[in-house]
């Protein structure tokens, strides 16, 4: 194989890796990461409609900025931790 071909293939793989990292990058705001309703529904395997019902019922804390709904990642983790049940043995 040509040295230049291997070099450019390696460079392309590196660029793909960097692109994947930056696509999912979420900067923190005050040390806290915020998620959109789409991200939360995907992580919890819920429909966005069910997530809206949880908001309306007061089960899920959220922030509303204009028309955008955001959830603190720590609040979502706290809800999961509170709902965790050990297996029976």
Image (tube, rainbow, N blue to C red):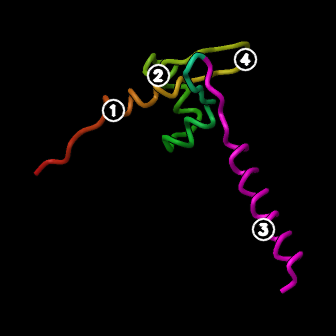
Residue 33: x and y in percent read: 57, 26
| Closer to the eye: label 4 or 3 | 3
Of labels 1 and 2, earlier in sequence is: 2
**Magenta segment boundaries in residue numbering:** 1-29
| Closer to the eye: label 1 or 2 | 1
Residue 9: x and y in percent read: 81, 71
Secondary structure of the residue carrying numbered label 1: helix
Q: Are marks 2 and 4 in contact (CB under 8 Å)?
A: no
Q: Residue furthest front?
A: 3
Task: Say which mark, if any, is on residue 67.
Answer: 4
Q: Residues within 10 Å of mark 3 (few under 14, many from 20)?
A: few
Task: Say which mark, if any, is on residue 73.
Answer: none
Secondary structure of the residue carrying numbered label 2: loop
Residue annotated with mark 3: 10
Residue at the (39%, 28%) spot, across then down? 79
Of labels 2 and 3, earlier in sequence is: 3
Of labels 3 and 1, earlier in sequence is: 3
Task: Say which mark, if any, is on residue 81.
Answer: 1
Q: Are marks 3 and 1 in contact (CB under 8 Å)?
A: no
Q: Residues within 10 Å of mark 1 (few under 14, many from 20)?
A: few
Residue annotated with mark 2: 60
Q: Main secondary structure of the magenta part?
A: helix
Of labels 4 and 1, earlier in sequence is: 4
Of labels 2 and 4, earlier in sequence is: 2
Q: Residues within 10 Å of mark 2 (few under 14, many from 20)?
A: some
Secondary structure of the residue carrying numbered label 3: helix
């Amino acid at each position: 194989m040509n040295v230049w071909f291997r070099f450019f293939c390696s460079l392309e793989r590196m660029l793909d890796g960097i692109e994947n990292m930056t696509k999912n990058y979420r900067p923190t705001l005050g040390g806290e990461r915020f998620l959109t309703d789409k991200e939360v529904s995907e992580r919890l395997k819920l429909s966005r409609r069910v997530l809206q019902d949880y908001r309306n019922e007061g089960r899920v804390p959220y922030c509303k900025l204009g028309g955008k709904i955001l959830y603190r990642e720590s609040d979502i983790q706290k809800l999961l931790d509170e709902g965790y049940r050990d297996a029976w043995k």
